[in-house]
Image (tube, grey):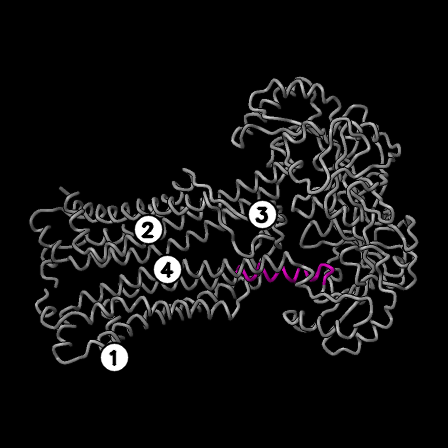
Amino acid sequence: MNFIMAWRNIWRHPRRSILTIAAIVFATMLLVFMLSWQFGAYDTMIDATVKIHTGHIQIQAQGYQDQRDMRKVVPDPNEIERILTSLRGVKSYTFRAEDFSLVSSENRTYGVLVIGIDPQKEPSVSTLEDMIRRGRFLEAGDRRSALAGEILADNLNSPVGGDLVLLGQGRDGSIAATVLTIKGIFNTGQDEFDRTMIHIPLEYFQELYNMRGAVHMAVVLCDSLTAVPAVKERIAGALSGIDSSLAVLDWKELNPGLVQAIQMDLVSGFIFYLILIIVVAFSIMNTFLMAVFERTREFGVMMSMGMGPGRLMGLLLMESLGITLIGVVIGTIAGAAVTWYFQIHGMVIPGAEEVARQFGLPERMFPQLSFLSIAVGAGIVLILTVLSALYPAFKVKGLKPVEALSAV
Amino acid sequence: MILKLAWRNIWRNRRRTAVILTAIVIGLWAMVFLSALMRGIADRMVKNAISTMTGHIKIYHAGYRNDPVIENRIENPGEIKNILQSLPAVRQFTSRIRVNAVAANARHSGGVTLVGIHPGREAGISFTGDAVTEGEYLKDEESQGILVGRALLEKYETRIGHKLVLMSRDASGEIASRAFRIRGIYDAELESTERQFVFVNLAAAQEMLGVNGDVTEFSLLIDDYEEAAAVAASVGRRFDGDDLAVYSWKELLPLVVAVLKMYDGFILFWFAAVFIAIAFGLVNTILMAVFERIREFGLMRALGMKPSFVVAEVSAESFFLLFIGTVAGNLLGAASVAALSQRGIDLSAFAKGIEFAGMSRIIFPVLELGDILTADAAVLVLGMAVGLYPAIRAARFSPVEAMVHM
């Protein structure tokens, strides 16, 4: 019976209830959309970073990640390959080796990171092949060939087909020197990459830098981001029996900046939402409060007919809960609908293209509707609104029937 | 009389007024404070980028920006210096040599940007002057010393007093190399800066590269950095015909400008969201206040008050609520900003993340009059507009209908 009474009471003042519901709908919609947006951006960001370069998991020598010391190598890639091919959850993998070297064209010299990649395996792990703007990707059997970043190629004044003199230091301290031909020019959109990197075939790298068959890292792509921890554990387990000098790093350890930037964005986002919802909660509290005061007489009548204060409170809470639930449900549906629309059509934030590009993001962004974004968005609104309804409900507890009856 | 009536009315139900005022105050505070926070981040970002070897205005050889090599250098720095000294808009300037180089020691090698500076003139223009936290700053006549960033020092596993060899192509196209001794270590806002720039004396760089007194850039500071584009244009006219290009910081730092634009959009979005949240509460509160007083309005109408009077009276009530809330919210926001102006907000816990986002480690909120006025105007004007709904509602009660209302 309480339920029916609460429901009727809500609609006794339709205008007030609708306005209150509208406020809740607005807050829920905004939250669901913004959270989906944030989570979508994070996914895109992680995905882009992982696919441009680092992969989900890397196997490196202990300490290589911090020091990038040429001599800290993964000595036997064949053994690693045997492990990786047999592991569940590993989608693809490749090997890389890298070192800093001097690269000169006819009249320009730059220090660059030279990366040895496997022309056949690399495309299954990174998007490098799709980033080729001119010329072609490396092919099996290529030897003195290189892919250069677009900015670097411009700086070197070297087009596709141009020759580069490379001068570096091998694993054993010997001099590594050769002439390379630019086969392709890539543009990742991230200036840092496009300015500082060239890629050459891994086999040729190993020869040139006297690697004696060793590489610097195995780069692994998993079936999905969520599978990473399990796969990491499996790889670590398989390695522990063989070589204790190797470390297994996941994308979080490989991109600490990205992870913290996401955390920071989440924290600041939550502060923003919290403030917004507090503002909404105060408006809602006012409505509830007024509804209670207006009805003092009514409560007096009910109490003198034997309704205990506890039950009265329950009734009021049920009323506010009803309003909140209606608002949250409509807001969630509307928010999901808006999000869904942009999830299909994408959205361009004017002026943000340049910024997005530098973080490896596409211009057109897609929010990502997920159970998490809906649950968190609706949950926050629900909790805060119910909390704001507690105070008015407690107010009736101290009500005395006689006094209440004489109230206007 | 309208004002008096409205003023009394809002205080008739103190609790209701207090609650809605709280909502407005929190909303305004949030607008003022968070926009100040974002402006603070943006402000630091701009200042940091400007002090990282950019300055407000830069003069290059016309080809240097697209192809930053020693061939594209300025070969008449003396003349330019004389002209710059004669320009009143230019507060301070210095000249530099800046080229890509390779830095190597026994253990490591890597790409860096070699910057040859006038230690004395540089100090007030870029961050270098007060960033040296260990060892000492470059002295004027010293040809051996080099300043490196802390991150570079750690990467190279070296320390003060040790040697660092720099290699770069000289003016004749040969690889020039020269050994320097680490004199001092600087700390910069961003680790990427610490890894990128190494500083030596201008004369030492000129000697190493064989350019005999030439430089690759002039960096200028002016009084108001917002005016940079206009001043750059007028400086550019002085060098017409020379093979020089003059850029303002906005042209040199397109990414920073893009971030600023994004922040502008975000602040407006934030204002809109908070305003809508306030608006619902405001309309509801006024509406309740109106419905409580149906009889009263009926009486007023019966006594001959025009509907327009009722609209004005109810609008005055919204105005009072909005006005008090706005003033209090502004004061609270300003107070929060003032409270943080000494210490700032320390984001060191997210050191790697802010590095990634290109932000600085400590944020000082900055109040911008434009933002405050926008927030206030939006809340007051739009608030009054949505407040019209309950006001018109109140004016529509016919006297008879209203009088019989219980």
Q: Label 3 is placed on what type of residue?
A: Ala
Q: Secondary structure at mark 3?
A: helix
Q: Which residue is mark 1?
A: B2
Q: Position of residue A14 (x, y in %)?
A: 20, 55
> Residue A114 sits in which quadrant?
top right
Mark pair 1, 4: CA separation: 27 Å
Mark pair 4, 3: CA separation: 34 Å
Q: Label 2 is placed on what type of residue?
A: Val
Which stretch did the figure color magenta? B37-54
Q: Label 1 is placed on what type of residue?
A: Ile
* Label 2 neighbour load within 10 Å: few <14, some 14-19, many 20+: many
Residue at (30, 70) in percent of width and height:
B318
Picture layout, residue A140 above or below residue A391: above
Mark pair 2, 1: CA separation: 35 Å
* Eye-nearest disc, 2 or 1: 2
Is A288 part of what is drawn in magenta?
Answer: no
Specify the subunit that label 4 lies on.
B
Q: Which mark is residue B349?
A: 3
Specify the subunit that label 3 lies on.
B
Specify the subunit that label 1 lies on.
B
Q: Secondary structure at mark 4?
A: helix
Q: Which residue is mark 2?
A: A25
Is B42 part of what is drawn in magenta?
Answer: yes
**Residue B365 located left or right of residue A105:** left
Mark pair 3, 2: CA separation: 35 Å
Q: Which residue is mark 4?
A: B276
* Eye-nearest disc, 3 or 2: 2
* Label 3 neighbour load within 10 Å: few <14, some 14-19, many 20+: few
* Eye-nearest disc, 3 or 1: 1
Q: Position of residue B293 (x, y in %)?
A: 17, 68
User: Looking at the rendering, in which quadrant would you find the C terminus of chain A?
Assistant: bottom left
